C-alpha cells in the first residue's frame, strides 16, 4: 500500500470519527450526546496524535532535504501540527475539568478541533502530498510506504478495539 493510500485511509477514518462526533453533539438527549462526544473525543485525540507523529516521521526527512519549496511545505505542516496539538491539549484539559453533563462547554471546543483537522487534511492532500510524491529517492518512498501500511493497520485495530470495549461497557452499564 502506498504512503498516499495509507494516509487517505487514515484521513478517512479520522474524518469518520469527526462526523460521528458532529452527530453526537447534535443528539437531542444531552446526557447521551455528552457521553458519546466524550468517548469519541478520547479516541479521536489519541488517533490524531498517532497520525500526526506518523506524518512527522514520513514527511520530515524527504522534504527537509529538498529545495526551498519543500522546506516551506514542511514548515506549514509543522505549524499546523502545533496548532492541532494545542487544540488537542486544550480539549484533553477540558475533558478532565468539565463535568460530564456539560455539553454546552464541550461542543465549541470539539467542533473547533474537528474543523481544524479537516482543513489541515485538505491542505495536506492538495499541497503537501504532491511535494512528497516528487521525492526522487525510491528507497525513501518504499520505506514510507511500508511504514504507512503498518500505521493504518494499527489505527484500524485500535479504533475497532476501542469501540468494542466502549460498546461492551455501555451495554453492561444499562
Image: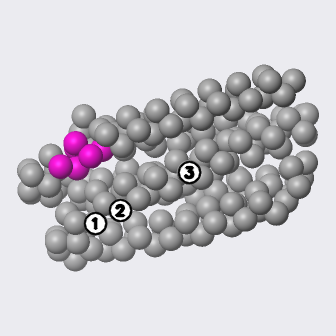
Where residue 96 appears, x then y in whole percent? 77, 60
70 and 14: which is toward the camera: 14
Question: Mark 3 vs mark 1: which is more N-terminal?
Answer: 3
101 and 106: which is toward the camera: 101
Q: Secondary structure at mark 2?
A: helix
Q: Is residue 7 visible?
A: yes
Taken as a whole, is the magenta stretch helix, strand or loop? helix
**Image point (50%, 56%), residue name:** 49
Q: CA distance from mark 1 to mark 2?
A: 6 Å
Where residue 35 appears, x then y in whole percent? 81, 40
Mark identifier at residue 46: 3
Mark identifier at residue 60: 1
Q: CA distance from mark 3 to mark 2?
A: 16 Å
Residue 5, picture quadrant = top left
Q: Is residue 115 visible?
A: no
- Please provide the residue range marked out in magenta: 143-148
Q: Are marks 3 and 1 in contact (CB under 8 Å)?
A: no
Amino acid at each position: 500500500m502506498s504512503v498516499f493510500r495509507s494516509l487517505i485511509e487514515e484521513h478517512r477514518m479520522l474524518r469518520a470519527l469527526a462526523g460521528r462526533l458532529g452527530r453526537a453533539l447534535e443528539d437531542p438527549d444531552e446526557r447521551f450526546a455528552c457521553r458519546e462526544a466524550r468517548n469519541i473525543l478520547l479516541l479521536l485525540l489519541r488517533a490524531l496524535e498517532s497520525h500526526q507523529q506518523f506524518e512527522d516521521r514520513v514527511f520530515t526527512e524527504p522534504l527537509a532535504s529538498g529545495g526551498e519549496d519543500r522546506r516551506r511545505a514542511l514548515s506549514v505542516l509543522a505549524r499546523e501540527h502545533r496548532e492541532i496539538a494545542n487544540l488537542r491539549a486544550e480539549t484533553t484539559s477540558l475533558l478532565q475539568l468539565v463535568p460530564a453533563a456539560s455539553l454546552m462547554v464541550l461542543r465549541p471546543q470539539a467542533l473547533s478541533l474537528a474543523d481544524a483537522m479537516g482543513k489541515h487534511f485538505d491542505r495536506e492532500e492538495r499541497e503537501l502530498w504532491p511535494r512528497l510524491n516528487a521525492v526522487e529517492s525510491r528507497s525513501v518512498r518504499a520505506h514510507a510506504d511500508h511504514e504507512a501500511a503498518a500505521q493504518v493497520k494499527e489505527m484500524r485495530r485500535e479504533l475497532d478495539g476501542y469501540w468494542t470495549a466502549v460498546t461492551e461497557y455501555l451495554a453492561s452499564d444499562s
